[in-house]
Amino acid sequence: MKRLARSLILAIMAAPSLLLAEPWQATLDANLLATQNAYSNSWTGGEAGALSWATNWNFVGQRQFNARWHSKNTIKLAFGQTHSQEQESKRWMKPVKSTDLIDFESMWRMTLGLFVDPFAAVRLESQFLDASQPDNIRYGNPLKFTESLGAAKSLFKEKDRELTFRLGAALHQEANRGVIIDLAGTKQDFSSNNGGAEFVADYKTPVGSDKISFASKMTVYKAVFSSQKDELAGLPGQDYWKQPDVGWENTLVANISKYLMVNLYLQMLYDKEVDLRTRFKQTLSLGLTYSIK
């Protein structure tokens, strides 16, 4: 009875907050992009056919539950392939992955009216199809989890314009499953974890009109400890994990009509443990789009 009474009291205390909760605000942007060309076996000139397609899904759902609690959930999904013809026989070869992303983040902010808002966030990053070993295709691999805690500040927040900064402590866990480690085909799972400081900047704005939008996200992470420290001791790259990791995404979208759009995507990555050089990715595409706002 005491537990039941306690539950009823908590429910009654929570009722006013639930009544004051604002409805969910959800936005969805989805697009499908494709290009195709093909040649017969009798075609001369050295050309080869190709079929490229990609789809992108961006979902944001946020809600102000009461005066103190705000929740924001973001899901980014992308996948695409390129199919090519063999130049001599014109036979279609096995498709090659061109883009692949699973990115989910959930963040809770305490909106106390202070200069900054305390926040807690969790994030999952992965791929639909891991083709890093062509003879060992794995699904939903590798996995990267991030838990962060710190302070957030919105410099401005309007319907279509927002600039938010976050700074805090973060923990990373990475798992790479079923890696072939020798010619006999032996598979092994690898995992690691590290922790440090993380800075995130999110910006979005219309450009000139409501038909053109720009979004940018920068993440800087500096590890201060790593579970691989002892394993890497004495190796040439033993201190690479100490270097800051930087990720910067920029997306410019122009809606030509209700269902037709042009998308320019630029991504820069720097992770010294992966490559000593900065990595770049650029995609310019025209395709079909669908939005819910």
Image (tube, rainbow, N blue to C red):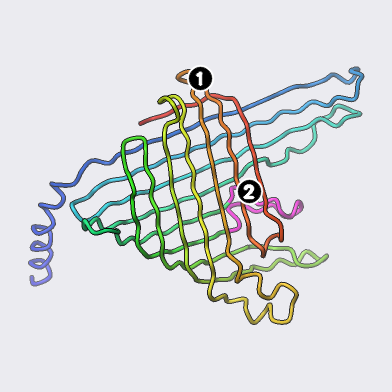
Which stretch appears magenta?
A: 127-142
Mark on residue 256?
A: 1
Classify 241 as above or below 92.
below
In percent of width and height, residue 100 lies at 61, 44
* Residue shown at 58% from the left, 71% from the top: 192
Q: Nearer the viewer, residue 130 or 259?
A: 259
Where on the picture, by quarter, is residue 90? top right
Say which amino acid is labelled 1.
Ile
Q: Nearer the viewer, residue 13 or 150?
A: 150
Q: Earlier in the sequence, mark 2 or mark 1?
A: 2
Say which amino acid is labelled 2.
Leu
Identify the residue position indicated by label 2 in the image: 129
Where on the picture, by quarter, is residue 285? top right
In percent of width and height, residue 25 lies at 30, 39
214 with respect to 161 (left or right): right
In percent of width and height, residue 143 lies at 56, 59
Density class for disc 1 (Cα within 10 Å; few <14, some 14-19, many ≥20) is few
Secondary structure, mark 1, is loop
Secondary structure, mark 2, is strand
8 with respect to 273 (left or right): left
Mark on residue 148?
A: none
Q: Nearer the viewer, mark 2 or mark 1?
A: 1
- Please check the rendered image and state whether residue 143 is part of the magenta-colored stretch, yes or no: no
Q: CA distance from mark 2 to mark 1?
A: 32 Å
138 with respect to 11 (left or right): right
Tell me, yes or no, whether the two marked residues, 2 and 1, touch with CB atoms within 8 Å.
no
* Residue shown at 43% from the left, 52% from the top: 105
Magenta stretch, main secondary structure class: loop
